[in-house]
Amino acid sequence: MNNQSYPNYGPQMPPPYQPTGGNGAYPPNGGYPPNGAYPPNNGYPPNGGYPLNGGSPPYQSRNIQCGSDGVYRWVYEVPLMSNPVVFVTVFKALGITFAILALIFVIINVTNGEGWEGLLFMGKLMLIIGGIFIVLFLLSYLIFAAINGWKYVMIFEMGQEGILLRQLNRQVKRAKAVAWLAVIAGLAGGNRGAVSAGVLSATHQEMYCEFGSVRSVKPKRGWHTIKVREMLTHHQVYAADEDFDFVFQFILSHCPKAGK
């Protein structure tokens, strides 16, 4: 075989354009704009160039991972003392119950014809009972927070049809929950089935929210909370600051009945 050279028939790239000018026909900085012709962040928009609507490519962050099944998973540790959302939610529920009882007592008082004196006595009695109720509620909440280590760990699994909310047992730490999700999402080696079973066994409470039945989606950014309400059930989804907009927009865009 001779050493004859053959022409390259593959695709050819044209030489870079070099406008004529001084300094050897090369413009300042070698003909390239600042930063080597690359825009900030290598040409990608913030957060890796992923859209907020869960499109392709999927959203990824240091907190949220998207598995091969297209489900977004993340862990959030809720501080029971610095984040008042749990306190306010429980207090509202009990307060509504107390208000209904007070209204029933007033109706009974009016029906019996006891007049203003009876209403005044009933009002004083309800104030005393209300004060005792508030004190007992505060003590109960402190005991609840102390038993749970002043925080609890939540796992969220958000897909196209709905979101699964899991509260883990107080013995489970955030680092362990994150490791579980890394395996489930296919980001680490291991037995996915065994890990999923471990998550289920460590779950203290589990609720599923179907997006098609959601009536209201309200963000509480200062509390890192998104309130998702169905007809009879209220859910609270938690997300870190950097992921809050994505989670909120994803839920809102998948709830056709929200706000209607």
Image (tube, grey):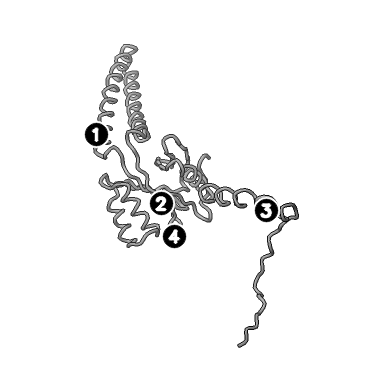
The x, y position of residue 230, in whole percent, is 43, 42
Q: Amino acid at mark 4?
A: Ser
Label 3, label 2: how far apart the Cα atoms are = 46 Å
Label 1, label 2: how far apart the Cα atoms are = 30 Å
Find disc 1 in the rendering and name its residue: 143
Q: Amino acid at mark 1?
A: Ile
- Outermost right residue: 20
At horizontal 58% and vertical 51% (from top left) the residue drawn is 43
Which label was assigned to residue 73? 2
Against 82, residue 56 (above or below) is below
Q: Of marks 3 and 4, which one's residue comes earlier in the chain?
A: 3
Label 1, label 3: how far apart the Cα atoms are = 69 Å
Write down the quadrant of residue 234 in the picture.
Answer: top left
Q: Of marks 3 and 2, which one's residue comes earlier in the chain?
A: 3
Q: How dense is the environment of label 4, judged by Cα within 10 Å: few (below 14), some, or many (20 and up)?
A: few
At horizontal 25% and vertical 36% (from top left) the residue drawn is 146
Q: Amino acid at mark 3?
A: Gly
At horizontal 30% and vertical 16% (from top left) the residue drawn is 124
Q: Of marks 4 and 1, which one's residue comes earlier in the chain?
A: 4
The x, y position of residue 178, in whole percent, is 35, 51
Find disc 3 in the rendering and name its residue: 31
Q: Of marks 1 and 2, which one's residue comes earlier in the chain?
A: 2
- Outermost front residue: 23
Against 194, residue 153 (above or below) is above
**Depth order, front residue of 190/105:** 190
**Depth order, front residue of 60/127:** 60
- Taking the image as shown, residue 228 lies to the left or right of residue 99, namely right
Which label was assigned to residue 103? none
Find disc 4 in the rendering and name its residue: 68
